[in-house]
Amino acid sequence: MSKFNVNLHEVIFSLSDALDLVGVDQIYHGKRVAYIAAECGIALNWDIKLLDDLFFAAVLHDCGVSNTAIHTRLTNFEGKNVGNHCDKGADLLQKRSLLASLSEYVLYHHTPWTELLNLDLSEAVKFGANCIYMADRVDILVLNSLQTEPNILASKEQIRRKIKAKAGRWFQYELVDIFLKISASEAFWLSMEQVQHSGYVHSWMQHNSTREIDFQDLKDIILIFSHIVDAKSNYTAQYSEGVATLSRYLGELFQLSEHQCDKLELTGLLHDLGMLRVPDKILAKPDKLTQAEYFIVQRHSFDSYEILKNITGFEDIARWAAQHHERVDGSGYPYHYNDQQLSIEARIIAVAVVFQALIQKRPYRDKLSPQDMMLELKQQAEAGKLDKGVVLMLEKHFTGCLQAAQLLGGIIQ
């Protein structure tokens, strides 16, 4: 496996855009929580390692949330571990060696201070998790107030009073005191509106320089986000992993380099990040989508690109992900590229996406038989939609491709 030159902080911060999409309209919630928590940590003179962990964990604190219904319930100020999202998020992080140390922050980020006191946890985790909890509730109060009053300053005193009222029970006294101190200024609240461009975010990303990361370690992190995408619907379990494995297998059949195949696999895992913005009811709809609903779905590949383009070293991955619904006759979306503009990697991803969808049940149809799957792919190739060469390669190695898409292992050459 190859290595990637990436800035891990940049990767996490950029991919966290996908988590923000789950709220549909509540963009940048995770980043605002990270900003609030970091401002408190800075004011308390926490060391740089603890601040880094705090910011990392705060950005990822809702990684256990995939669907909009759960996210909506979290906007209730009294809401806690809705949908077991704390446990799910902690489990995702615990499985990734580079992020396992953050799992306890996420696991306890809705646990009141009075309960944290009795748990066998390090002081850093207790304070960090409670700081994220407080920051999360501050932002929820902000989001709720903006529904009726668009000026964030109009609600700041009411929000400060609500947080103060929870001191000693939900939140540790010192954390509340420092929040009340730093939130007294208008600048604190106004900065929340531009949090993704804040000076701390820039310095945090620059603090972790670009370095070589093994493909497997990078894939481990990316699997967090593909899992979130696939968990959004009951019909898409392991969908992204299937696309990734099949794309890699096809890339190897076309004798692409190991590094290109690694990038193909990562693209497969990340190509549908933008689907997190699509409301659950549209994904679960058993009938044909309306034109308005289809327009909503159509933007997902562009949203995936908007997330991935900000990661240095992911230029090809971002481009191929953006093009996974393009067609060789120019009839796809969102760019209407044709065969002259689509690389072999983009064509492979497009075929893998269609194939993977055909082998899985959907709310509007059952999964297709192997014969019907191949017939559908060949018809799309003959119609000028999918690349004929890729479809022919898939047909020639059909059993191996089917095993790759179904994550069965032992792929037959």
Image: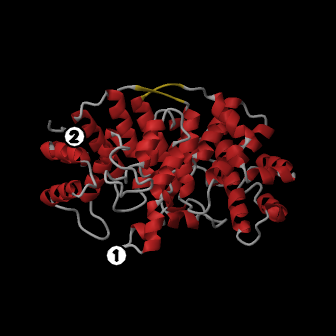
Closer to the camera in the image, 332 or 40: 332
CB atoms of marks 2 and 1 within 8 Å: no
Foreground label between 2 and 1 = 1
Q: Is residue 152 left or right of residue 104?
A: right
* Image quarter in which the C terminus is found: top left
Residue at 70%, 53% in the rendered image = 134
Asked whether residue 66 appears in the rendered view, the answer is no
Residue 346, by quadrant, is top left
**Regarding mark 1 in the picture, which secondary structure is present there?**
loop
Q: CA distance from mark 2 to mark 1?
A: 34 Å
Asked whether residue 172 appears in the rendered view, the answer is yes
Residue denoted by label 2? 409
Residue 45, by quadrant, is top right
* Image quarter in which the N terminus is found: top left
Name the spot of residue 9 as percent of width and height, x first. 58, 35
Say above or below: 78 vs 45. Answer: below
Badge 1: residue crowd in 10 Å (few <14, some 14–19, many ≥20): few
- Colour style of the rendered protein structure: secondary structure
Say above or below: 127 vs 374. Answer: above
Name the spot of residue 118 as percent of width and height, x first. 63, 48
Q: Which mark is residue 287?
A: 1
Seen as rendered, the residue at the extreme front is 340
Residue at 73%, 61% in the rendered image = 142
Mark 2 or 1, nearer chain start = 1
Residue at 41%, 36% in the rendered image = 219
Label 1 is placed on what type of residue?
Asp
